[in-house]
Amino acid sequence: MHRAINKTRQLAGFLQRFQSTLVVAEHNNDKLTPITLSAITAANKLGGEVSCLVAGTDCAKVVAELSKVLGVNKVLVAQHDAFKGALPEELTPIILATQQQFKFTHICAGASAFGKNLLPRVAAKLDVAPISDIIEIQSPDTFVRTIYAGNALSTVKCNESVKVFTVRGTAFEPAASEGGSATSEDVASSSSAVGVSEWLEQNLSKSDRPELAGAKVVVSGGRGLKSGENFQLLYDLAETMNAAVGASRAAVDAGYVPNDMQVGQTGKIVAPVSVTFPIMNPTIVAINKDPEAPIFLVSDFGLVADLFKVRSLPPPLLSAGSLSLMALHAALSC
């Protein structure tokens, strides 16, 4: 029995030496997006070499940044005007050309809008089935993802020749941004650019608060806030905690806040957690005047009160909320 187990472990270690993973880097030509660091951590769990593809225009800063990331062996650089805006129609051919040249066993990216838009297209071109939003890697061909709105876990065994998957950023620690010494190599980009799409412009709203999907602390409100004006209570609290502000789907559907503030299964994954039923274990502080509210079943700290009558939070709640996630449910459960 012990011999069989040892042989299995030896075989697994032998196979891992032949693994190679391509991480498609998400960036804005100036700075790397944090979710890419989480994808690099996931890639290193597979064993073998990890290469990162940087496709863009004038992205030398991103290449230099990635070269220092711990766990990256090689940075592949493709620069062309067609890659401006990271359009999936233009990035797919360069990924396919890179795959044909290096024969990676795995291709991954963060499960952001960028990754979810790009990798299914790549998988279709490779004629393989992609795996989306993984939260755990059990072996080079076995992955875990959430299903049923995050209420269950699904273990997926992938027998495809190339495993293509996206990584939930909050499920993997970001790779260290210092300590690496990756080499860089240019890959042919002019022959891969097809020019079927053209990037015109991008208009983004600016905020002094942290970006919602990557924030360490999130203050989230629901339908019980009753109006968009009452979200100012959350904005004021967020300022004191350097937190991002989110909202439940009910609050977004009611028109209290724009849909880019929505968190949860149909919005941005922040812990990973939905406002009412998290599947993992962030620190949750809840306020709700209903002592039977479902949020209290999963909260680490709770205060039974009407938010509009609570002028200041007890210090223990503020301290606890600064650890990970604060979900404020006023008046009504979402």
Image (tube, helix red, strand yellow):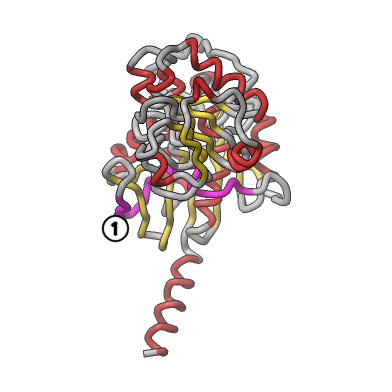
Labels in figure, total: 1
The kind of residue on which mark 1 rests is Asn
Q: Residue drawn at (40%, 78%), measured in percent from left and top?
A: 8
Q: Is residue 188 left or right of residue 280?
A: right
Question: Image quarter for residue 115?
Answer: top left
Above or below residue 190? Residue 109 is: below
Q: Nearer the viewer, residue 102 or 290?
A: 290
Name the quadrant of the C terminus: top left
Circle 1: is it few (<14), some (14-19), or many (20+) Cα within 10 Å? few
Q: Is residue 232 visible?
A: yes
Q: Nearer the viewer, residue 218 or 88?
A: 218
Name the quadrant of the N terminus: bottom left
| Residue 70 percent across, percent down from the top left | 66, 51
Question: Image quarter for residue 248?
Answer: top left
Q: Nearer the viewer, residue 240 or 89?
A: 240
Above or below residue 75? Residue 116 is: above
Identify the element where label 1 is drawn: loop
Q: Residue drawn at (53%, 29%), measured in percent from left and top?
A: 219
| Residue 306 percent across, percent down from the top left | 46, 26
Residue 157 is one of the magenta-drawn residues: yes
Give the extent of the magenta segment. 152-175
Residue 215 is one of the magenta-drawn residues: no
Q: Nearer the viewer, residue 321 or 125?
A: 321
Q: Is residue 92 visible?
A: no
Q: Is residue 24 left or right of residue 332?
A: right
Q: Residue drawn at (32%, 44%), measured in percent from left and top?
A: 130
| Residue 49 percent across, percent down from the top left | 55, 56
Q: Determine which residue is flagged by label 1.
A: 159
Q: Residue drawn at (46%, 44%), measured in percent from left and top?
A: 299
| Residue 125 percent across, percent down from the top left | 31, 37
